[in-house]
Amino acid sequence: MAGRCGSCARVLPKLDPAACNALEQTASGLLVPRTAVSGIAPGGAVSTARSVDIDVTAPAAGACPETWQVGARLTPVSGQTSGAVSLNAAPASTWVPVTGADLVLPEAGVYEVVADVQGSIAWAAPVTNAIIDAHVQDVTAGVEIPMSARRIILFTDQAATGTSGIQANASAGALYQVAGPTTIRVEGSWRTDAGTTSQKVVWATNFRFKKVSD
């Protein structure tokens, strides 16, 4: 007849004591830590250093197995502004900041920088090469953003009589990489080869940036 053990000790499973083992033997039993994944609301961000948001849909209560749905969406940092400046008092061939057209690229990365600019110039004939230019300046580094310079107006008419004027538009855009927070701005400039000009104005009708990669 088989015997019966009434005082045998219960053998507990042996756990590896390595620090990477998430299981723990407690007085009440085996403890298995549980990880709950959470997302953020659409349009939100954990910080400005994040250009991709992760969306998480939790499983239904009591679901077995627990199935989590995880997805990602782009949320690149961006910004825009506008401004205007009169160049009437500025010396010829001098870059003048457009008032209000300053932006801060908030973090390291590659940005698409675009400035929709408008210029106007009036002159008393005869005038040769009445010019309005614009570009985007990296104020932090003290350099022009490459490929951002645009000629808004170039007017040449030595036969004109009386006082006239002209207005034109251009778009200055470029991809620009920065190593950290960087201030950029639109600047305007004017000059003539001969003749007298007045009412020289540059507008940044829409100055904007969008981060495209880290």
Image: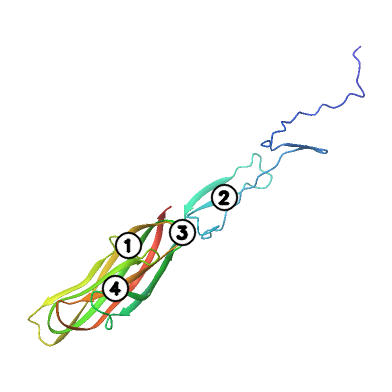
Residue in view at x 31 percent, y 69 percent: 116
What number is the disc on residue 95?
4
Answer with the quarter of the image where residue 3 lies.
top right
**Residue named by callout 1:** 145
Q: Residue at x 35, y 58 (%)?
A: 176
Q: Mark 1 or 2 closer to N-term? A: 2
- SS type, badge 4: loop
**Of the residues shown, which amino acid type is indicated by label 4?**
Trp
Please determine whether, in this image, residue 30 is positioned above or below residue 175. Answer: above
Precedes in sequence: disc 4 or disc 3: 4
- In the rendered image, the residue lying farthest to the left is 159
Disc 4 or 1, which lies upstream in sequence?
A: 4
Q: Position of residue 44 (x, y in %)?
A: 53, 60
Q: Residues within 10 Å of mark 2 (few under 14, many from 20)?
A: some
* Nearest-to-viewer mark from 4 and 3: 4
142 to the left or right of 122: right
Q: Seen from this angle, which residue lies furthest top?
A: 1
Residue type at numbered disc 3: Glu
Residue at 34% x, 67% y is 137
Query: Is mark 2 in CB contact (under 8 Å) with mark 4?
Result: no
Sequence-earlier tag: 3 or 1: 3
Mark 1 secondary-structure assignment = loop
The residues bearing labels 4 and 1 have C-alpha atoms spaced at a distance of 14 Å
Cα separation, mark 1 vs mark 2, equals 39 Å
The residue that label 2 is drawn on is: 56
- On the rendered structure, is 54 left or right of 129? right
Tell me the quadrant of the picture where the N terminus can be found: top right
Q: Residue 145, image x and y in percent?
A: 32, 62
Question: Of tags 1 and 2, which is closer to the observer?
Answer: 1
Disc 2 is placed on an element classified as: strand
Marks 3 and 1, how far apart at CA: 17 Å
